[in-house]
Image (tube, helix red, strand yellow):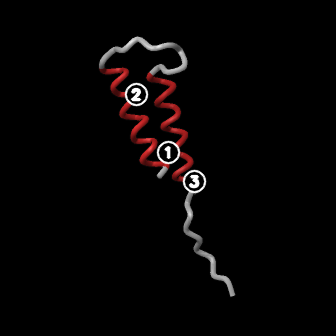
Amino acid sequence: MLAIAAAVLFFIAFLINAADIGTNDVFSSTNVMLLGLMLLALHVAGVGNSLRTGRRR
């Protein structure tokens, strides 16, 4: 789920950059891209994974 959110943020950052949309400093394409990278790193680290691999006895 985090990877999908990261992909959406990367797409938004691409649109902001490609269309040369003037936004304020908070929603610049670089900041949106960094948020996407953070979500991708969390996904790779396994945060938000609801599957448990351990066995209970």
Q: Nearer the viewer, mark 2 or mark 3?
A: 2
Tell me residue 46's x, y (percent): 57, 57
- Left or right of 56, for residue 17: left
Residue holding disc 3: 45
Tell me residue 21's x, y (percent): 36, 14
Tell me residue 54's x, y (percent): 63, 77
Residue 7, picture quadrant:
top left
Q: Which residue of the protein is positioned furthest toward the bottom in this rendering?
A: 57
Earlier along the polypeptide chain: callout 3 or callout 1?
A: 1
Is 42 drawn above or below residue 37 in the view shown? below
Image point 56% across, 64% down: which residue? 50
Residue holding disc 2: 13
Earlier along the polypeptide chain: callout 1 or callout 2?
A: 2
Label 2 packing within 10 angstroms: few (<14), some (14-19), many (20+):
many
Image point 53% across, 14% down: which residue? 25
Image point 47% across, 52% down: which residue? 1
Label 3 packing within 10 angstroms: few (<14), some (14-19), many (20+):
few
Q: Are marks 2 and 3 in contact (CB under 8 Å)?
A: no
Q: Are marks 1 and 2 in contact (CB under 8 Å)?
A: no
- Left or right of 18, for residue 51: right
Amino acid at the residue labelled 3: Ala
Q: Quadrant of the C terminus?
A: bottom right
Residue holding disc 1: 40
Q: Which element is circle 2 on?
A: helix
- Left or right of 12, for residue 50: right
Tell me residue 33's x, y (percent): 46, 30
Q: What distance separates the C-alpha of mark 1 from that of mark 2?
A: 14 Å
